[in-house]
Image: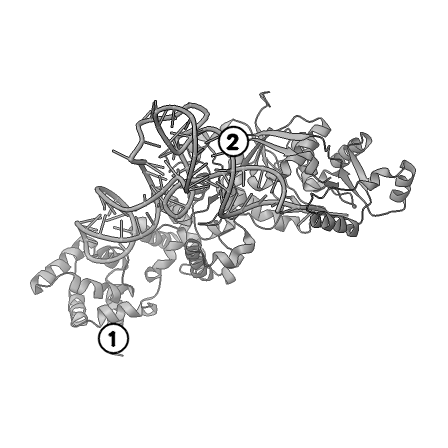
Amino acid sequence: MNSSPRPVRTRFAPSPTGYMHIGGMRTALFNWLWARHNNGTFILRIDDTDEQRNLDAALGPILRAFKWLGLNWDEGPEVGGPFEPYFQSERKSLYHTAIEKLIAEGKAYYCFDTPEQLAAERAAAEKEKRQFLNSRRSLELSELERNKRIAQGDPHVIRFLTPRDLTVKLDDAIRGHVEWDCSLMPDPVIMRGNGSPLYNFASVIDDAQMQISHVIRAEEHLSNTPIQVLLHQALGNELPIFAHIPYVAAPGSKEKLSKRKLEQYRKNPQFKKMFERADDVFPKIGLENAGGLDPVMVEYYEKIGYLPQGVLNALARIGWSLDDKTEIMSLDEIVKNFTLDRVVKSPAGLDPDKLNSFQAHWMMQLPVDEKLTGCLPFLIAAKYIPPEPNDKTKETVRQVIEALGDRLKLFSDVLDYDEFFCADDQLKYDEKAFEKRLKAEGAAELVREFATQLETAEPFDAPTLDALLHRFVDEKQLKIGEIIHALRVAVTGKPQGIGMFECLAFLGRERCLNRIRHSLARLEK
RNA sequence: GGCCCCAUCGUCUAGUCAGGCCUAGGACAUCGGAUUUUCGAUCCGGUAACGGGGGUUCAAAUCCCCCUGGGGUCACCA
């Protein structure tokens, strides 16, 4: 086994797809954690292809996701490093050198088989219920013939010559001992006709050249591993330690979380809430069609107002645990405790409920100033406050946030309290609540009467108003519930919200009276 | 279908390697109750799992075998 104490170097190698997958983020996180845990190096390498157009647009959201979560990379785009370049498209000479070496040593070969030939052979193998293996007929070409065909531009690829007499044996850091019989493995294409390398090949070259010590990736790559091991061996590379972590499944399922199944996820009871939240919030902040964001994308969580710490805590707990009880952990604590031997083997579903619970916890811990910083952009985008709020406006928002207390779970939750930001005559009413509370027998009269007391209440603060209303109901021998709900609806338009007296005090005398007047007038209609 | 992986409450997991401390622990969700002017939060309590069958052993969630189930992957995608 691999016993040399190599410095820990891990990598995450996304291909620029225009968004960061939440499951991919979890894989990246585990790589990052393992590097940080060992005072090692975390590398970001971009698996782009030469056909990639508009790289910036495709890569931007990915880098943004890392930055948002605070997962910094030691080598890679923007920061460079000793093994530059970190873009696959710029590393062609490396791949070509390796290819030439393999060909010279007879470990890879030019293959002139046409797609039709291959398809027919595959079909035949399937029909006979045997494993398809390459015919290797191109190997029989003489050097002269072969060179001639290359020279005249016959379409060809380069295949790795799988040593069919071997068994690949591997000790995976998570899955333990795994073996593959090479006699069942077709010869993989390692370079296309146009000279660009395939993933399995480029990945091996890059991992070796960048001295990657641990390849931590999702389980779906397990079946790629024997090819990569064989390639490493053919090239004389020191083998990295492989660690295949479980893939992230869709909520409540064992199926890999996939962007292609989005429509299906909309019906998933747990995911449904996240889609609904998106449908509610994103239009308010000016993102049409939810801004193209969905809960498979990391950007969704950022844009809807999650905290990095909440997302990180949830991600870390998908397929990893510290012990039998510790759930809530800061990133520092996770780094300190993260080890590969505590990664679970079976796939784990993303659990939106659990994520929300972590999120709620970390939001509660957040100082008000930071809540304010987080909430302001939402209020601005929703046009509840001006684009460049002055100190007075900020102070107002701050008071709302304080009054909200632990009702604020996501930053975007502040948008649910539009009653504090709208003009008195623009108040929206919850019709059901209006019916039930204000149209209730005698409710309007009580509110009207109490309003006259509000006119003279001094000072207009929560404790005073609290005492005032209690005296009011005592004198009338009412229960407080007989007026307070109607009062709430009259002032906020809603059946629920922050403490009633805080609410009145916050709005102030004039606005309270205005709103009550407005509501009572509305009742007439 | 071939190859490979996986299997504990609804979900995420602890326990499995070194069998007994497991009448299986925690968390989320859920259901009750308390508290509260509402919502939220908080507190208390409840329901709820070792896929099945054979072994081995004084003793098995834990070791062995078989079955079943679930999943991944089979490209000139990554």
Q: Would you say residue A287 is visible in this rendering?
A: no
Residue A249 in the image: state x and y as whole percent: 49, 47
- Coordinates of residue A357 in the picture (x, y in percent): 37, 46
Mark 2, secondary structure of its residue = helix
Residue drawn at (36%, 46%), measured in percent from left and top?
A: A360
Frontmost of labels 1 and 2 is 2
CA neighbours of label 2 inside 10 A, class few (<14), some (14 to 19), many (20+): many
Q: Residue A370's quadrant in the figure?
A: top left
Mark 2 lies on residue: A34
The one nearer the camera, A163 or A29, is A163
Q: Is residue A81 left or right of residue A142?
A: left
Disc nearer the start of the sequence (1/2)? 2
Residue displayed at 86% across by 38% down: A140
Under mark 1, the amino acid is Leu
Q: Is residue A12 above or below residue A4?
A: below
Which image quadrant: the N terminus of chain A?
Answer: top right
Above or below for A479 versus A326: below
Badge 2: chain ID: A
- The numbered disc on residue A523 is 1
Dot 2 amino acid type: Trp
Residue positioned 37% across, 55% down in the render: A414
Closer to us: A251 or A54: A251
Comparing A179 with A78, the one in front is A179
